[in-house]
Every structure is written in C-alpha cells, then in structure tokens.
Image (tube, rainbow, N blue to C red):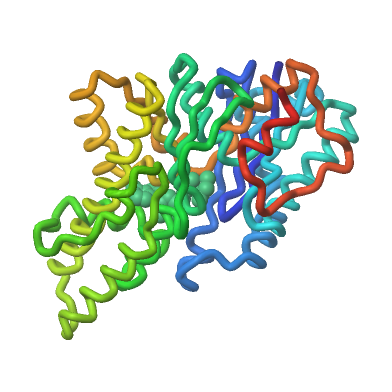
Amino acid sequence: MLVLAIETSCDETAVAVVRDGREILANLIVSQIDIHARFGGVVPELASRQHLQAICPLVDAALAEAGTSLEQIEGIAVTRGPGLIGALLVGVAYAKAIAFARQIPLVGVHHIEGHILAVQLEKLVEFPYLALAVSGGHSHLFRVEGIGQYQLLGRTIDDAAGEAFDKVAKMLGLPYPGGPVIDRLAKVGDASCVRFPRPMLKKPNLDFSFSGMKTAVLTYIESLNTQISEQQTADIAAAFQEAAVDVLVQKTMRAARQEGLSRIVVAGGVACNSGLRSEFSAACRKECIDVYFPSPLLCSDNAAMLAVAGDAYLERGYRSASDLNAVSNWPLPEAALHFI
Ligand code: KG4
Ligand code: ZN
C-alpha cells in the first residue's frame, strides 16, 4: 500500500510517502526553528500559520520526490495527537480533505506510537520490546507487544526529558531548541564540576522526574554569583546531561529486567543525544540486551514514522471517520485500544 503521511503536531511540517509501511520514498521536513528561536520556544499561533503555508507545497514536493502522484496514493496517515491543537488541526483537516476528494482511506495515528515504531523503517525489531520514548513532551516507558499493543510501564511525573534539556539551555543563555546545543557542549565540558541529583532513582517504580534536576541547575548557576564563562557553560551542560542520561538509562535497564525483555528501542528527539546513545550501548552490552536507535532523522519529528502504524491499521481495514478531530491530550495505550 502506498501511504501519504502527514505530521504537524508541533514546530515541524512533515510529509512522507511510504510503501507497505517499510520503504521510504520521500520524507520531507520543513522546520520552523528559526521562527520560534527568537521567542525561546514554540509560539503555538505562529506554528499553525507556518504549517498552513508549508503543507501544500510540501505534499507536492514529497509526491515529486517519490516519483508518484496523488492518484496513486492508496491511504493517508496523519498525526491526530497529542500536540498543539491549532498545529494538529492543519494536518488533520488537510488529510481529511485529500481522503474525501480522492475517496481513499484515512487513519489518525498517535504521535508517540509513530516515534516508537519508527525503528521498523530501518530494522525489523522483533516484538515484544521495551520502548523509551523521549521527546519534548514525553518521557515514557512502554512494553510494546505489537502494533497497537502498548503497556505503559512508567512516565515522567512532571517535565519531559526534552523539555528539561530545552529549559536548562535557556538558563545557560543557549538558543532553542537546547537539546542539540547541550549535546554539543557536553562533549567539551567537564561533568565533574558539579553532581546534579538523579531524581526517582531510589524509588522502585519506573517513573521519571526532571523538574528537580532543572531547579538544581538553576540553583547552581545562581550560586556561582557571577557571569558564567563559556567553559563553565559547557561544564554545566555536561553535568546536566550526565544526570539526565544516568536516570534514563538506569530506569530503562530496570524496566527491561523487570519485564524480562531483551530488546530496547530508544525513540523521540532526545534519542539523538550522543551521551544517551553511548551510555545505553555500554549498559546493554553488559547485560546482553540489544538496543536500537532510529537514525537521527527518524528520531526527531518526521512523517515517515506515522506510516508504520498507519499502513498496518489501513491494511487491517481500520478507517478513521470523516469527522476525525485532532486531540491535544491523548494518552497512548488508550489511543491505540480501538485499533485492536
Ligand atoms: O521528538 P521531537 O522531535 O519532538 C517532540 O515530539 O517533542 O523531540 C524534540 C526534543 C526537543 O526537546 C529537543 O531539544 C530534543 O528533542 N533533542 C535533543 C537532541 N536533539 C533533539 N535532546 C538532547 N540531545 C539531542 N541531541
Ligand atoms: Zn515527536
């Protein structure tokens, strides 16, 4: 099945053409980072307007790159939620319009479901596996039994990991989005300058908390009582990244042990982080667990990832109705329940 996938949940307009939920023919992204950077974060109203401007030419460009036309598209997958409601609505309305005009089936997919299945576009990872979804809005651990079958094992009780990276970067006067900048600086920083707390590690559950870590960084910066130098900025970035990675890796390894799972998939924008990748690889090597990271383009927001679930649902005959609406707050296991 040839699927056109559309993603507009936050600050990236993304369109992909994917065959059989496996073969990417086009995967295009228009980023709005430059527009939001001067405000230090995503401005929802601006995001919606940019999606509106970008979506039509991007669909044309994706079809051209895939060497196909709208007439050949057999189904549409679109992010239904969670995300910024105005931004989501652009993609959902556009997808519904094409589906109606072409009389082809449409399916609304959960954004995080897309992230945790994106790996299947590069490597067929056998189910069941443990998925750590770490993005700007999520830090969630799922047991993944198959497409549509997710059990939530743990989640952040406050901020998401990506949000913490972005906020710490802001405290350090670094540009938005902060994750990639902290990652880069951490390579030249000395993490031993300060040890930030590892919240929730002593608790036996599988939940995370990043809010206290963020406050600890702020308190430390304030305690220096002076304009911080470039080297100090890099050192703080390294110490923060070390603490965040430590918590994410240790809790995920605990989850794998408890669930008896020998495969871990790390997904979402924060999965681009080089420290996270190397620490996970080292921990998994020790415990004979296979760890998989999608390549960076498939970790951060993209549309191809939606086609994995989208294709499977469409093949099984599932269709979203023509009154499909966007949902800003949509918990994953519940979201997928009606598909199985
Ligand atoms: O999955 P994603 O592209 O969008 C959401 O669904 O939120 O994730 C975006 C988040 C941002 O918070 C960004 O700072 C973070 O992923 N991120 C990173 C890195 N690259 C992106 N965080 C840490 N290290 C990175 N290299
Ligand atoms: Zn995302």
Residue 263 located left or right of residue 75: left
Q: Tell me how many marks there are.
A: 0
Q: Residue at x 60, y 25 (%)?
A: 149
Rendering coords of residue 324 (x, y %): 82, 42
Residue 162 located left or right of residue 239: right
Where's the C terminus, which quadrant? top right
38 or 320, which lies in front?
A: 320
Up-down relation of residue 335 to residue 23 (above or below):
below
254 or 2, which lies in front?
A: 254
Q: Residue at x 66, y 30 (%)?
A: 64
Up-down relation of residue 243 to residue 206 (above or below):
below
Up-down relation of residue 265 to residue 236 (above or below):
above
Rendering coords of residue 249 (x, y %): 29, 39
Rendering coords of residue 135 (x, y %): 46, 48
Q: Can residue 321 be seen here?
A: yes
- Which residue is the extreme one toward the front? 204
Q: Residue at x 21, y 73 (%)?
A: 220
Rendering coords of residue 245 (x, y %): 28, 46
Q: Can residue 59 be seen here?
A: no
Where's the N terminus, which quadrant? top right
Q: Quadrant of residue 181?
A: bottom left
- Which residue is the extreme one toward the bottom? 225
Q: Quadrant of residue 292?
A: top left
Residue 133 located left or right of residue 292: right
